[in-house]
Amino acid sequence: MENDDAELVARVRAGSPDAYTDLVRHNQQQVFSILHRYERDIHLVEDLAQETFTKAWRALDRFDGRAPFQHWLSRIAVHVALDHVRRRKRLAGTIALPDIGEDSVGWLRDELPPRELEGRQAREILDLAMRALSPAEQIVITLMEIEGRSVKEICSLTGDSSVAVRVRAMRARSKLRKAIEKLEDSEHE
Amino acid sequence: MNDKKLNQLFAAARRETPPVVPAGFAERVQRGLGQSSASTTTVVSFWDQLNHNFARYAVAAAAMIMLCAAVELSQSFNHDPSIADDVNQICSDWMLH
């Protein structure tokens, strides 16, 4: 896969724009998976993915091949996601809070065994609770706890120092805990 | 909310299936790139620029004419030689030279 990507990048640089379509096809699932962690609306995810690939195309001259193309592209996708979360945060006052499904409410009230909580329901709760976090904290906690990436990987993707990543992750966990407690209390009322 | 519950929440979120990429996405990206590069390479002709800035040029020209007329008028009130007299003088000097 890595060799395929390197070969396709070489073909794009040699003046074959169609090779970029193949490059997009090779990496589109990975980019959608990253972006979907920060945005549930599939149409918006598609827009963000398009933005990611457009930015990658424009910056292709700066890709030096030291890291795999996939990693380089992931870094662009994470920055596109960060910009998106920042924009959404600015508009947060004008957007209505999404409704949480009954099953998610049941889990919050400890009425549902943990095993029965689906990914979608967990996302509903997390999306709501994450509004208490700063955009940078949202990115770090998602990369660490949901994507399961190491501190070193997160540093490489975000450009932050390892101390900054650890501090943000700790702060994010604490804020999330409080936000979910608040959510539990509001659901009990 | 204890740590265990928060970890259960993360574990459940990890199980969420990623979305399916819509068909033809790569082609749409390619089309978008084609359009953006086409729009950035569009050549703007001299006449297009002139047309675009026509209103500004017209205002600038009108302001210049009004300024000249005002100077001419003020000089004629002060009985100073007007700009037209000066120009005539320069022309005749140059012709006789």
Image: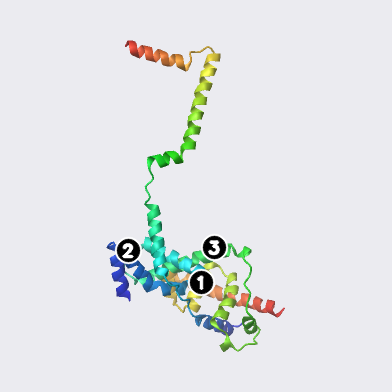
Residue A120 visible in image: yes
Residue A159 visible in image: no
- State the quadrant of the N terminus of chain A: bottom left
Q: Residues within 10 Å of mark 2 (few under 14, many from 20)?
A: some
Give the mark nearer the N terminus: 3 vs 1: 1
The three-letter amino acid code for the residue at tag 1 is Ile
Residue A87 has which mark? Answer: 3
Give the mark nearer the N terminus: 2 vs 3: 2
Residue A105 x/y as whole percent: 64, 81
- Residue at 38 percent of width and 55 percent of height: B38
- Residue at 32 percent of width and 65 percent of height: A18
- Tag 1's secondary structure? helix
Colour mapping used in the image: rainbow
- Are labels 3 and 1 on one chain? yes
Residue A5 image-quadrant placement: bottom left
Name the outermost residue toward the top: B96
Q: Chain of mark 3?
A: A
Could you say which is closer to the camera, residue B78 or residue B87?
B87
Name the outermost residue toward the front: B24
Q: Chain of mark 1?
A: A
Residue A148 x/y as whole percent: 46, 79
| Relative height, residue A160 to residue B47 (above, below) | below
Query: Label 2 near label 1: C-beta < 8 Å?
Result: no
Q: Chain of mark 2?
A: A
- Residue at label 1? A42
- Tag 2's secondary structure? loop
Residue B74 x/y as whole percent: 54, 18
Residue A17 has which mark? Answer: 2
Q: CA distance from mark 3 to mark 1?
A: 17 Å
Q: Residues within 10 Å of mark 3 (few under 14, many from 20)?
A: few
